[in-house]
Image (cartoon, rainbow, N blue to C red):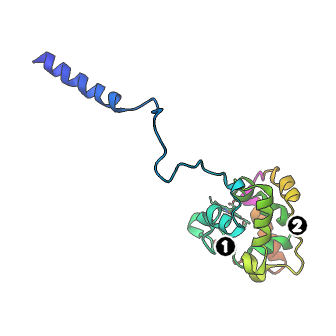
Amino acid sequence: MRTRLLLGLLCLIAAPLALARAIPDPQQRPAPGNERPQVPIAEAGYSTAVNYQLQCAGCHQASGQGSPANDTPRMRGFVGNFLKVAGGREFLVRVPGISQSALNNVQLADMLNWLLTRDGMAGDSLPQQVQPYTAEEVSAIRSVSILNLPDTRSGLIKAMQAQGIVIEDGMPR
Ligand code: HEC
């Protein structure tokens, strides 16, 4: 009786170990339709709008309306205001969604230049004169990280308020 019990216990312990496949199967083939290796997004050559949907819309939402429940501010009709205050131009490149993105500097410059158009995201928040970002500028600004993002952002918001700009970023305040 005791031997059987011990044998049963041993089986219980050994079964999951025997089932777990620690060594990858060298004969394993990719699933059908999945044969080609994945192309990194920085080399995929998608349009800016597609890059936005793939890399940004998860948080910022499809049309840039943001998600206050997830602390993501609205970009649509608001993001252009950052270009009206000192430090705002750099801030837009240094937010983690951009500076730590898998997109390359050319793609990010294109993305920012697209966001900062009337039809892209900025709408009426766009200043009269906008100097387009270049890949070199993005590269230089991107490599310097923001030490205190919330304070930096609220400083920029205060500077906007001082100019009489109405803050419609969808965030509670
Ligand atoms: C994981 C969620 C997430 C992703 C993905 C993301 N962002 Fe963001 N983004 C945020 C949050 C949250 C903020 C507010 C500032 C902060 O806390 O970082 C923000 C701020 C910004 C800002 C500054 C506007 C403001 O009001 O602060 C810009 C511009 C921006 N993001 C662009 C992008 C772009 C372009 C992408 C895609 C390449 C992207 N983000 C991907 C969450 C995200």
Viewer-side label of 1, 2 = 1
Amino acid at the residue labelled 1: Arg
The verdict on residue 28 being magenta is no
- Give left or right: position of 55 versus 4: right
- Relative to 23, is 28 above or below? below
Provide the residue designation for mark 2: 86
Amino acid at the residue labelled 2: Ala
The x and y percentages for residue 83 are 84, 71
Provide the residue designation for mark 1: 74
Q: Nearer the viewer, residue 112 or 85?
A: 112
- Relative to 79, is 34 above or below? above
Any part of residue 166 in sight? no
Mark 1 vs mark 2, CA separation in Å? 20 Å
Residue at left offset 81%, top offset 81%: 164
- Give left or right: position of 133 versus 121: right
Q: Nearer the viewer, residue 49 or 145?
A: 49
**C-beta proximity under 8 Å, tags 1 and 2:** no
The x and y percentages for residue 81 are 80, 75
The x and y percentages for residue 115 are 75, 72
- In the rendered image, the residue lying farthest to the left is 1
Question: Does the closest atom of ligand 1 sit within 8 Å of the Cβ of label 1?
Answer: yes
Badge 2 marks a residue whose secondary structure is loop
- Relative to 148, is 30 above or below? above
Residue 173, picture quadrant:
bottom right
